[in-house]
Image (spheres, grey):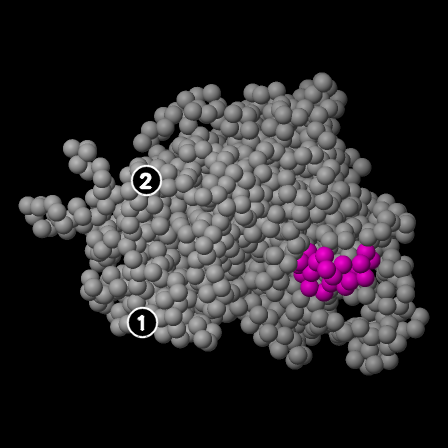
């Protein structure tokens, strides 16, 4: 039995719906929807399309890009404001080529350059799942893009450059697990969309997974490089991080990564997570981006004046959750030690978390941190960040208050 | 779902959701209302209990994270040496005003003295900065901790 | 934490206002006074309690003695941390000749017997409890003592003047006989109520003026103290309330099924503008409310922001208002001034943020109701429940509880009415809690004030013209409409209309401008917290402009106020005013007379290069007349200063799209222990003066002392609260 499945295991799931002969069409339909739901999570659709302040997929979330603001669309099957009128053919064209209904070109915030790798069956399963949801009438605000980016036809040229429009091809020299992981990571999880630097035309550069800055957050280097990337992580740490958003000694997912875990990764099977880890492990090392500092800080006498002031504020507002030594207190999600974000001298993610907070749904309930902008001055937030960086990350560079000004 | 929680030395089996914070278990299910709700987001310290001797915020301590650990609340802190000293110092210095924050303050101060029997002013600042007192009893809290510490020897 | 409603401060108010206030008192208070005269029969509720408690001697509503000698004091004020249980007990015990440790305490029920005759209702606020009780409660104790003595004298067949009360017993002077209060209780109950009560002379005080251990602290260190939120009633459920985040909005929908699906949720109930999810415990209620995902029609305030409110106020402030004080000719004097300063001061909306969030427990039945709550106004609380349920007030029992911080918030009972409208929908007792987020966003806020002030100085440093026009909400108009004086809210100008200084040409005006999107309420320090900041900052500005030392300048202007000079001198001496300070440090001074108490405060601040403000030390010299409980005075000044400094540094409530932007302590920030300055309080004795209030005095002094210190340290004059964010590294 097992050998029969062996070769194309990673694709097997994609074709189940078409080859099996269920006695009832309804049962097949249910099965398809269930599979679609799983893939919907794996493709992390909700992270972008969930409406702010609700749990519905009615879109409306703004994405601020260098060339303007784009709002996520309503992906409930409402016929006027949602995706209710899409035929299967139109759906595939949208997912694979970035051309929406009526020939409108999508902007590449929608990761169709990744989804293009998805099999037709998987893409349609996701559609089946979405069509099984309750239609909701809700129109997101119109995009506000600057010329020439507000000209959708311009995307034709962008696609020539950046969207190869082809499906995933398994690498027969690699294991079945690796191939499954590659498919999940590239076609569904679209991890590269955040973690690979962009070219000048907002396409992905050739430095795959070397890390990048997206909307103020740093997506870290995922390559197998030890100092900059994931080389020093154990499999268990990686699995735990992807599945739960925390890894002992490696910190916690926050911001967009927390959303990826909350809406997508935590629903995935252990096998699939392990497959993704196997694939990530194989990424060729690129020594770029901030490095990770393990272990405790040196003596406080080496800290800057700003850092030392930051400590006073840290014990007021932060230590309640994180503990003075950063071990995290009432929850493992409060751990700071070993996190990439606290040894990145630019402090990008630290600044973001302090500015706007973060939250993550976990098996033990929601964990969250509020933003601290209203209660503290930019100077104070800069001092807290500087302290965190020097104390937990051994990075002795003060964060500037300007990072906390609007 | 059942969880075994050890509170003030007594093990209780509780059939509660895994994400339920210990604060509400203490207050609403066990009637231990000395532990207070002030903010629910680990900013005020009113809900402080000891988890294996560490001061933690019970408003964010889920039952699943607490199961299998020792929890001590204000109701039993007098049974520890440091706790009794802190309480006495609190009386002697007349620290308390409305009193709502004071369970948390006493739990934080007790943990401090258990770890550092003779704290410096900086130690006191660091250990107590997470506990808000809206009535502003800070001047007396400092004094009371110093007092409790000098009785230590 | 509200102004005195009826009490007139001597010499400060125009006589017409005094007359009006007097009328207001007498109109409604005939029966109230009687409740105060010791010995008058108890009202029914208390009689019933006597039966229940086995008391046999209850000479008045405040004292009960049973046959075993157990003495119970019924305290009509809410204990919110101000130590009033102790202070009031000291008054009663002093005259009754008891030690405090012989006394049991009980919170008074809602009952006319406990109405504060000065306030005109059962109320704890305005730093008035000790002031209003100073004579009446001592009389209550003394009358009881006299009746016990009379009973003993009668029993022994001797004259009363040969008997003496001491430590809970009556002794016969000429023989070794003595009887305990318990033994005398029954006979005392049959004694005639004394017509004339003689009070102890202060020289004989054994308790008053000492520092006994506070009566409420023991239970507060071991977790056994019961605050309103700790109430537990058999069969009780717990609910979380959420009201529309925008004032005036309505509930349009919610997911009932989803809420009921949450484990432990038992009910979802609604009001037109609010929803409550009820569960077996608070966690179920919290999760249930999340699942209910309420939807709202935000109504007409949905577009309002603080900027709109302030812009309107600013416009309103351009017109003249109702005159509170007009002496001489301010405008003419200003024209002649040598130096003239025209300034605008802005004070933000403020939340109370008491550490115990709003909560009410109710059991509403067909025939009556029980309400367990901590309130500063039990009578109003009862009326709210009556209004909400249609039950007659007599059928409603209010069980008052310890309050985890009041600061004025629990002078309003709207949350109790709201809770009653929910609770009448369910048959079981229910504890309804506001989360911290609800407590801050749905608070009734200290008004925003927009003050224009102009003052002039002559060449020789005398003030030439003073024109202060304050614009803001009139809390009095909503809370106590009878207190309005022809359009003037006396609270809005308290501390501005009367200053410690000689201001021959003075015009003080009030322009009322009510914000639609928030409700306003009393806040610790009330009018003076607002006005003294403006006045004392302005005095400081003038002193610096004229090149005078701010202390000497004040002494000169207040030369006619001997008590002012005494506190100024004491604060200056204790703080070392005038000494050389390290670079970046500055000292500021503030003087004020509020709640019949004089206080001078000197604050030393340090401002770091980065703009970080560090509070170094505060000295306050205070003269509040006779002192009942000196350590209580010290504690109140310490706490009041921290409260006021927290506000001055950090606090403001702002609105965006009609919603309050601050939600919890991470964005409505509280001062922490590691920021708190050392505070020294120096009591300036003045036993013959009228007794003054103390709970709000420290709060009033904080902002002006800090603003003046910051000016001394940096040369930067702050006319807007809060201060911290006005200091930045780049600017320093
Ligand atoms: S209630 Fe837990 S810290 Fe405030
Ligand atoms: S004593 Fe009231 S909050 Fe601390």
**Disc 1 and disc 2: Cα gap in Å?**
38 Å
**Residue with the mark numbered 2:** A174
Q: Nearer the viewer, residue A165 or A301?
A: A165
Find residue C46 and report its horizontal and vertical position in percent.
49, 41
Query: Is the residue indicated by label 1 positioned so its CB lies within 8 Å of ligand 1?
Result: no
Q: What residue is at 34 percent from the left and 45 percent from the top?
A: A182
Q: Label 1: chain?
A: A
**Residue with the mark numbered 1:** A104
Relative to C477, is C347 on the left or the right?
right
Upstream in sequence: badge 1 or badge 2: 1
Find residue A176 and report its horizontal and vertical position in percent.
28, 39
Q: Nearer the viewer, residue C731 or A1?
A: A1
Q: For the magenta stretch, what is the residue range?
A: C711-732
For disc 1, the neighbor class at 10 Å (few under 14, some 14 to 19, many from 20) is: few
Q: Quadrant of the N terminus of chain A?
A: top left
- Residue A381 visible at all: yes
For mark 2, give the secondary structure.
loop
For mark 1, give the secondary structure.
loop
Q: Residues at marks 1 and 2, common chain?
A: yes
């Amino acid at each position: 039995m097992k050998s029969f499945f062996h070769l194309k295991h990673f694709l097997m799931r994609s074709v189940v719906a078409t080859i099996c002969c269920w006695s009832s069409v309804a049962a097949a339909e249910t099965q398809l929807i269930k599979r679609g739901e799983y893939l919907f999570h794996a493709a992390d659709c909700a992270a972008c399309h969930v409406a702010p302040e609700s749990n519905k997929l009615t879109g409306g979330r703004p994405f601020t890009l260098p060339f303007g603001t784009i709002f996520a669309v309503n992906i409930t099957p409402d016929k006027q404001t949602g995706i209710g009128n899409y035929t299967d053919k139109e759906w595939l064209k949208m997912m694979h080529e970035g051309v929406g209904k009526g020939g409108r070109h999508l902007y590449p915030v929608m990761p169709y350059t990744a989804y293009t790798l998805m099999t037709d069956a998987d893409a349609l399963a996701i559609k089946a799942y979405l069509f099984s949801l309750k239609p909701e009438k809700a129109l997101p605000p119109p995009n506000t893009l600057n010329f020439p980016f507000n000209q959708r036809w311009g995307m034709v040229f962008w696609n020539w450059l950046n969207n190869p429009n082809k499906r995933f091809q398994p690498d027969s020299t690699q294991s079945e697990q690796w191939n499954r992981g590659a498919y999940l990571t590239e076609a569904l999880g679209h991890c590269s969309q955040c973690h690979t630097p962009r070219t000048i035309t907002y396409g992905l550069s050739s430095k795959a997974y070397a890390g990048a800055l997206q909307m103020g957050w740093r997506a870290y280097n995922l390559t197998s490089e030890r100092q900059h990337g994931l080389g020093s992580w154990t499999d268990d740490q990686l699995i735990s991080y992807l599945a739960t958003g925390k890894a002992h000694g490696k910190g916690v997912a926050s911001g967009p990564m927390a959303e990826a875990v909350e809406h997508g990764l935590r629903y995935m099977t252990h096998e699939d997570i392990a497959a993704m880890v196997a694939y990530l492990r194989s990424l060729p090392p690129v020594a770029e981006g901030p490095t990770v500092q393990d272990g405790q800080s040196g003596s406080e006498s080496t800290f800057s004046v700003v850092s030392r002031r930051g400590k006073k504020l840290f014990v007021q507002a932060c230590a309640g959750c994180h503990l003075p030594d950063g071990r995290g207190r009432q929850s493992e999600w409060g751990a700071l030690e070993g996190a990439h974000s606290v040894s990145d001298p630019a402090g990008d993610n630290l600044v973001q978390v302090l500015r706007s907070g973060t939250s993550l749904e976990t098996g033990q309930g929601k964990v969250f941190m509020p933003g601290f902008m209203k209660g503290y001055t930019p100077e104070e937030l800069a001092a807290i960040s500087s302290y965190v960086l020097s104390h937990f990350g051994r990075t002795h560079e003060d964060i500037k208050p300007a990072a906390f000004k609007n | 779902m059942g969880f075994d929680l050890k509170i003030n030395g007594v093990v209780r089996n509780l059939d509660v959701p895994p994400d339920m914070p210990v604060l509400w278990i203490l207050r609403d299910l066990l009637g231990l209302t000395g532990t207070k709700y002030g903010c629910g987001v680990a900013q005020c310290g009113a809900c402080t209990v000891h988890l294996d001797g560490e001061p933690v915020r019970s408003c964010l301590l889920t039952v699943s994270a607490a199961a299998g650990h020792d929890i001590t609340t204000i109701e039993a802190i007098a049974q520890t040496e440091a706790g009794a000293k802190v309480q006495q110092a609190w009386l002697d210095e007349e620290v308390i005003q409305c009193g709502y924050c004071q369970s948390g303050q006493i739990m934080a101060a007790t943990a401090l003295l258990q770890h550092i029997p003779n704290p410096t002013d900086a130690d006191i600042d660091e250990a107590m900065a997470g506990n808000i007192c809206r009535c502003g009893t800070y001047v007396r809290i400092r004094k009371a901790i110093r007092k409790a510490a000098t009785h230590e020897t | 934490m509200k102004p005195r409603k009826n009490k007139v401060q001597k010499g400060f108010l125009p006589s017409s206002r005094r007359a009006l206030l007097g009328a207001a008192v007498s109109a409604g208070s005939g029966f109230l006074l009687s409740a105060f005269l010791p010995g008058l029969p108890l009202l029914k509720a208390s009689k019933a309690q006597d039966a229940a408690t086995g008391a046999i001697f209850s000479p008045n509503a405040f004292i009960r003695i049973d046959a075993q000698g157990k003495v119970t004091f019924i305290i009509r004020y809410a204990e919110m941390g101000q130590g009033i249980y102790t202070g009031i007990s000291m008054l009663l015990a002093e005259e009754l000749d008891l030690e405090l440790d012989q006394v049991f305490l009980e919170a008074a029920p809602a009952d006319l017997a406990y109405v504060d005759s000065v306030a005109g209702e059962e109320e704890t606020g305005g730093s008035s409890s000790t002031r209003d009780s100073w004579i009446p409660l001592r009389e209550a104790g003394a009358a009881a003592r006299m009746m016990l003595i009379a009973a003993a004298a009668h029993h022994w067949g001797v004259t009363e003047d040969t008997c003496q009360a001491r430590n809970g017993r009556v002794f016969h002077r000429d023989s070794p006989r003595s009887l305990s209060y318990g033994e005398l209780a029954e006979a005392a109950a049959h004694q005639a109520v004394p017509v004339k009560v003689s009070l102890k002379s202060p020289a004989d005080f054994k308790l008053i003026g000492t520092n006994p251990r506070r009566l409420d602290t023991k239970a507060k260190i071991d977790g056994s103290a019961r605050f309103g939120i700790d109430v537990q009633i058999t069969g009780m459920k717990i609910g979380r309330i959420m009201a529309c985040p925008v004032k005036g909005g309505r509930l349009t929908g919610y997911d009932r099924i989803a809420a009921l699906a949450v484990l432990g949720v038992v009910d979802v109930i609604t009001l037109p503008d609010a929803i409550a999810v009820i569960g077996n415990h608070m966690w179920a209620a919290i999760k249930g409310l999340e699942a209910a995902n309420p939807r709202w029609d935000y109504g007409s305030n949905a577009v309002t922001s603080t900027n709109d409110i302030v812009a309107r106020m600013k416009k309103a402030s351009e017109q003249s208002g109702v005159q509170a004080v007009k002496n001489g000719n301010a405008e003419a004097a200003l024209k002649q001034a040598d130096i003239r300063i025209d300034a605008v001061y802005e004070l933000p909306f403020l939340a109370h943020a008491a550490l115990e969030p709003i909560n009410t427990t109710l059991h509403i039945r067909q025939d009556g109701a029980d309400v367990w709550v901590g309130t500063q106004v039990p009578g109003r609380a009862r009326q709210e429940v009556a209004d909400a349920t249609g039950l007659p007030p007599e059928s409603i029992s209010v069980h008052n509880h310890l309050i985890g911080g009041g600061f004025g918030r629990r002078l309003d009972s709207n949350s109790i009415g709201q809770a009653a409208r929910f609770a009448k929908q369910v048959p079981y007792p229910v504890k309804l809690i506001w989360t911290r987020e609800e407590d801050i966003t749905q608070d009734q806020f200290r008004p925003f004030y927009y003050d224009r002030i102009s003052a002039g100085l002559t060449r020789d440093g005398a003030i030439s013209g003073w024109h202060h026009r304050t614009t803001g909400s009139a809390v009095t108009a909503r809370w106590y409409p009878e207190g309005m004086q022809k359009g003037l809210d006396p609270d809005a100008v308290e501390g501005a209309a009367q200053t410690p200084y000689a201001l021959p040409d003075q015009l003080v005006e009030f322009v009322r401008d009510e914000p639609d999107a928030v409700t306003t309420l009393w806040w610790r320090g009330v009018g003076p917290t607002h006005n003294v900041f403006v006045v004392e900052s302005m005095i400081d500005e003038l002193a610096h402009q004229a090149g005078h030392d701010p202390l000497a300048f004040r002494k000169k202007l207040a030369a006619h106020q001997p008590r002012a000079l005494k506190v100024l001198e004491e604060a200056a001496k204790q703080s070392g005013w005038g000494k050389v300070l390290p670079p970046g440090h500055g000292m500021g001074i503030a003087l004020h007379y509020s709640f019949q108490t004089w206080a001078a405060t000197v604050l030393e601040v340090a401002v770091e290069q980065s703009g970080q403000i560090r509070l170094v030390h505060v000295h306050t010299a205070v003269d509040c007349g006779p002192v009942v409980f000196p350590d209580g005075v010290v504690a109140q000044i310490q706490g009041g200063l921290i409260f006021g400094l927290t506000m001055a540094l950090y606090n403001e409530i702002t609105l965006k799209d009609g919603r309050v932007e601050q939600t919890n302590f991470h964005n409505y920030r509280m001062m922490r222990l590691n920021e708190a300055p050392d505070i020294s309080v120096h009591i300036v004795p003045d036993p013959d003066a009228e007794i003054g209030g103390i709970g709000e005095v420290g709060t009033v002094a904080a902002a002006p002392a800090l603003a003046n210190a910051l000016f001394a340290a940096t040369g930067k004059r702050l006319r807007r609260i809060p201060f911290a964010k006005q200091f930045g590294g780049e600017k320093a």
